[in-house]
Amino acid sequence: MNLLFKEIKLALHPSMFIYLALSTMVLIPAYPYHLIFFYTALGIFNVSMFGRENSDPLYSVILPVAKRDVVRARIQLAALCQLAQILVCVLLMPLARRINPTGNPVGLDANLTFLGSGFLLYTVFNFIFFPAFYKTAYKVGVPFILGCVGIAVYMLAEEGVLLLFPPAAVLDGFAPEHLPARLLALGIGFAVWLLGLVLTYKRAAARFEKVDL
């Protein structure tokens, strides 16, 4: 059975499309663009909360599938939403640069480093939220709060690195001579995100298999 199809048709909450539309905030001058990625995390929280209210965990485990497959499908859905958010940002970034040619004074500019950093932020949230949620498959509030704390710590650490270590400033801005560094930042962020998905799945699935629904 294709559980990912079931997730898209039955579990995906409509609010996720609103949060994807909030990617347009990348066009706002002097705005902390990392908050855009927080809204995807909020959408994942909504999916989990409304799934709980509709007894989705119980419904899923009575299907002819393994419990690990239930976790895999949910994480795959989250990954698709996160990729969609990145894609919308990519489409808007050229316009953002034209609107804000001098860059963003309150955080990373809307460039490739920003996208790579977004992947790292997603990794932190995923690795905290999903294993905590699938420890019970019903308690969603505390896992989300822990995930938000992880996001906040990451954002402060990322801004601190740029401020305290001047060489890291080459990752910001739009200077063409620093494009290889920004491409590297994007590649590292994407690779860490993929590895994080695998580790998150293994950790969350191991916990869910111990849950008696």
Image (spheres, rainbow, N blue to C red):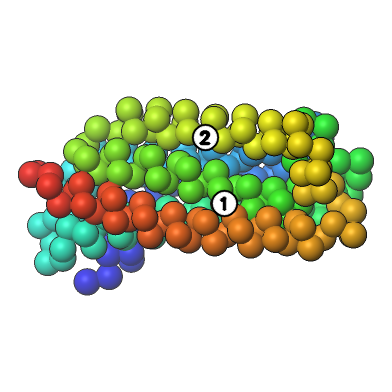
Mark 2 lies on a secondary structure that is helix
Which disc, if any, is residue 164?
Answer: none
Query: For mark 2, does the 10 Å Cα neighbourhood hold few (<14), some (14 to 19), or many (20 or more) residues?
Result: many
Outermost residue on the left side: it is 212
The amino acid type of the residue labelled 1 equals Phe
Q: Position of residue 115 (x, y in %)?
A: 66, 52
Q: What x and y, as percent, mark residue 137?
A: 22, 41
Image side of residue 25 versus residue 4, left or right: right
Which tag, 1 or 2, sits closer to the chain's start?
1
Across and down, in percent, residue 50 comes to: 30, 39
Q: How many marks?
A: 2
Judging by the rendered image, the residue that carries numbered circle 2 is 151
Quarter occupied by residue 104: top right
Q: Residue at x 85, y 57 (%)?
A: 178
Q: Residue at x 75, y 56 (%)?
A: 182
Of 75 and 108, the residue lying toward us: 108
- In contact (CB < 8 Å): disc 1 and disc 2: no
Front position in the image: 191 or 75: 191
Say what amino acid the circle numbered 2 marks: Ile
* Residue drawn where x is 91% and y is 45% of the image: 101
- The residue lying toward the viewer, choosing from 2 and 200, is 200
- Extreme bottom residue here? 1
**Alpha carbons under labels 1 and 2: distance apart:** 12 Å
Say which quadrant the N terminus sits in.
Answer: bottom left
Dividing the image into 4 quarters, which one contains the C terminus?
A: top left
Please identify the quarter of the rendering in which residue 184 is found: bottom right
Residue tagged 1: 119
User: In the structure shown, which secondary structural element does the residue marked by tag 1 occupy?
Assistant: helix
Q: Quadrant of residue 139?
A: top left
Can residue 21 be seen in this snapshot?
A: no
User: Residue visible at 30% across and 34% down?
Assistant: 140
